[in-house]
Structures are given as structure tokens and as C-alpha cells.
């Protein structure tokens, strides 16, 4: 979150990505922005099209 990729990012992003499958779940704006930025930087899509 501080602009430098760290081991924390490697652990946190998969968790946040997996939450993108949960329909109706809202995250704080800064967390949503972080998740979107990490998805874009890593070229790993979020799971919104699989929402349940």
C-alpha cells in the first residue's frame, strides 16, 4: 500500500481477490483501490464475473 511491493502484498492480494466473488460485499474505498491496482499490476483478474 505504500507504493513498494512487499511480502505483505503477496499475502494480502489473494485474500482480497477471493473476496471479489462475494456478491454485495463492499470494501472501504482505499482497500477497493488497492485491490484494483494490484490486479492491474499483476495482470490477474478479479472474480466479479463469478459473484455468488
Image (cartoon, rainbow, N blue to C red):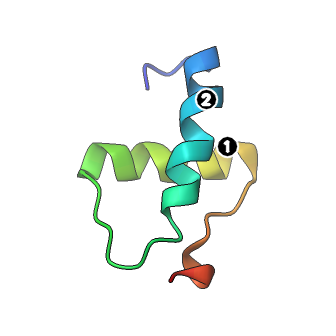
Tell us which disc is closer to us: 1 or 2.
2
Q: Give the crowd class for mark 1: few <14, some 14-19, many >=20 residues within 10 Å.
A: few
The one of 9 and 3 positioned closer to us in this rendering: 9
Total count of labels: 2
Q: Is 38 placed left or right of 16 in the picture?
A: right
Helix, strand or loop under label 1: helix
Mark 2 neighbour class, 10 Å CA radius: few under 14, some 14 to 19, many 20 or more: few
Which residue, as the protein is rendered here, is positioned at the far right? Answer: 43
Q: In x, y percent, where is residue 9?
A: 57, 27
The reply to whether discs 1 and 2 touch (Cβ–Cβ < 8 Å) is no
Q: Position of residue 10 (x, y in %)?
A: 65, 28
Which residue is disc 1 drawn over?
41
Q: Earlier in the sequence, mark 1 or mark 2?
A: 2
* Image coordinates for residue 37, horizontal then vertical, percent: 53, 46
Q: Whole-Å distance between the Cαs marked 1 and 2?
A: 15 Å
Q: Is residue 31 visible?
A: yes
Q: Which mark is residue 11?
A: 2
Q: Left or right of 13: which side holds 26?
A: left
Task: Identify the residue shown where x is 50% and y is 22%.
Answer: 3
Measured along the vertical axis of the image, is residue 52 above or below residue 10? below
- Pinpoint residue 27: horizontal percent, then vertical percent: 29, 56
Q: Is residue 34 above or below residue 28?
A: above
What residue do we see at 67% from left, 43% from top? 41
Q: Quadrant of the N terminus?
A: top left
Amino acid at each position: 500500500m505504500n507504493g513498494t511491493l512487499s511480502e505483505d502484498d503477496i499475502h494480502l492480494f489473494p485474500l482480497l481477490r477471493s473476496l471479489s466473488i462475494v456478491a454485495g460485499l463492499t470494501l472501504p474505498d482505499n482497500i477497493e483501490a488497492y485491490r484494483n491496482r494490484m490486479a492491474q499490476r499483476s495482470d490477474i483478474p478479479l472474480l466479479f464475473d463469478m459473484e455468488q
